[in-house]
Image: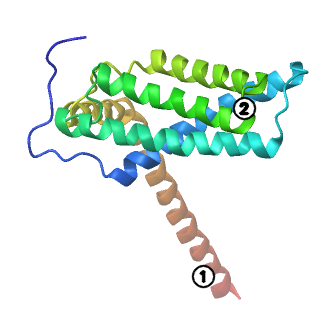
């Protein structure tokens, strides 16, 4: 990990807390859907597992809400101090992971006690979170707002250039259709006028 990374200027303001929480809850929901699917599959093959649907849903929802809120609370000081949406670093990345693992283990123990069901849920929940951790590599610092804006502007320019010929062709065809429709209407009116004169 680089020792220095560009940061936003002092006038930068972090994302609103509600937006951060919403984003975390969205990604957390997707993550827990994977956990729920794997846990459900495990119950099909585990004769000693006793997990009712209501209890499982309760554990998943509680784990989602508390885990993501803890993660937001842990990450926020790093974001503000680092002046980046994703400042990176081991504190920023590892502490939220520990919060996820802890909430999963605690709620599994509360729901199922010291049982095979609790252990299996804890293992699945930990595996999914660890997998996502190494996939997105949160210890690496993200982009500054200027870098993001520059990439967005570059993408827009590239898209505009790529579709420029198509846009010109579409406009040309539209003008031709409008012109043809105009002359067709004008010709139709002229024929109707001649027909009325003959009558």
x and y, in percent, of residue 89 in the image: 27, 21
Q: Residue 151 sits in which quadrant?
A: top left
Q: Residue at x 67, y 38 (%)?
A: 110
**Quarter of the view holding residue 39:** top right
Q: Residue furthest front?
A: 114
Q: Which mark is first along the chain, 1 or 2?
A: 2
Say which residue appears at 61% left-offset and 71% top-offset: 188
Q: The residue tagged with tag 1: helix, strand or loop?
A: helix
> Tag 2, which secondary structure?
loop
Residue 171 seen in this snapshot:
no
Classify the position of the N terminus by image quarter. Answer: top left
Q: Which residue is mark 1?
A: 193
The image shows a total of numbered marks equal to 2
Between the residue at mark 2 and the residue at mark 1, the CA separation in whole angstroms equals 91 Å
The colour scheme applied to this rendered structure is rainbow
Residue 47 occupies which quadrant of the picture?
A: top right
Tell me where residue 6 appears, x and y as whole percent: 14, 25
* Residue 70: percent from left, percent from top: 43, 40
Farthest left residue?
Answer: 10
Residue on which the image places disc 2? 113
Q: Nearer the viewer, residue 106 or 128?
A: 106
Q: Is residue 144 above or below residue 173?
A: above
């Amino acid at each position: 990990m680089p020792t220095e990374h560009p940061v936003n200027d002092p006038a930068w303001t972090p994302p609103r807390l509600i937006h951060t929480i919403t984003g975390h809850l969205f990604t957390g929901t997707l993550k827990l859907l994977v956990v729920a699917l794997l846990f459900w599959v495990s119950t099909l093959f585990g004769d000693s597992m006793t997990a009712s649907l209501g209890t499982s849903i309760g554990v998943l929802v509680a784990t989602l809400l508390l885990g993501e809120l803890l993660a937001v609370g842990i990450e926020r000081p790093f974001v503000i101090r680092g002046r980046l949406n994703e400042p990176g670093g081991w504190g920023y990345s590892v502490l939220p992971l520990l919060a996820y693992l802890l909430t999963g283990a605690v709620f599994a123990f509360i729901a199922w006690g010291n049982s095979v069901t609790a252990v299996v849920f804890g293992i699945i929940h930990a595996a999914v979170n660890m997998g996502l951790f190494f996939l997105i590599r949160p210890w690496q610092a993200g982009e500054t707002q200027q870098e993001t804006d520059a990439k967005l502007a570059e993408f827009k320019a590239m898209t505009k250039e790529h579709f420029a010929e198509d846009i010109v062709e579409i406009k040309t065809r539209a003008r031709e259709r409008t012109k043809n429709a105009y002359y067709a209407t004008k010709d139709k009116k002229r024929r109707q006028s001649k027909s009325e004169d003959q009558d």
